[in-house]
Amino acid sequence: MNNIVEKIREKEIFKLKYYCCEMHVNHALDMYIAETKDFPILDKLSEEEKLSTKCDYCEKDAEYIVSRK
Ligand SMILES: [Zn+2]
């Protein structure tokens, strides 16, 4: 039983991503760590992605993505 729960959780963590602007980088990192108990990587978005992606925490365009290593 627990195994299934663990597997689902792993999958969710695998998909977990936060987009954030420069101001919300630390917040996004904290959220990720709180959620996964793991350290994420921080990547800059490409110019193209920036234009189509908003920060998860405010109305600005996203600059970074926080995701799994
Ligand atoms: Zn923001």
Image (spheres, rainbow, N blue to C red):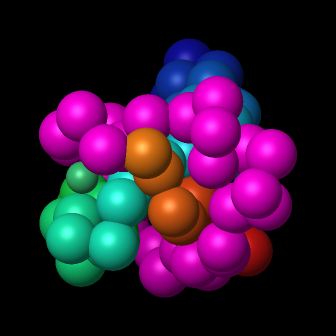
Question: In the picture provided, is 32 more to the left or to the right than 10?
Answer: left
Q: Eyeballing the image, is 27 above or below 36?
A: below
Q: Position of residue 43 (x, y in %)?
A: 66, 75
Residue 52, located in which quarter of the rendered image? top right
Asked whether, in this view, residue 54 is left or right of residue 43, the answer is: left
Residue 48, above or below 25: above
Q: Quadrant of residue 30?
A: bottom left
Write the start and end of the magenta stretch as one range.
35-60
Give the residue drawn at x 47%, y 74%.
38
- On the rendered image, what quadrant is the C terminus found in? bottom right
Image x and y of residue 66, in percent:
53, 63
Would you say 15 lies left or right of 28 here?
Answer: right
At x 33% / y 72%, what residue is drawn?
Answer: 22
Q: Nearer the viewer, residue 34 or 52?
A: 52
Comparing 26 with 44, the one in front is: 44
Residue 62 at what x, y percent from top left? 47, 51
Q: Residue at x 63, y 48 (%)?
A: 50
Where is residue 25, by image quadrant?
bottom left
In this rendering, does residue 12 appear at all?
yes
Which residue occupies 49% across, 80% down? 39
In front of the other: 51 or 35: 51
Residue 30 seen: no
> Could you tell me how many numbered marks the image carries?
0
Q: Is residue 19 magenta?
A: no
Q: Quadrant of the N terminus?
A: top right
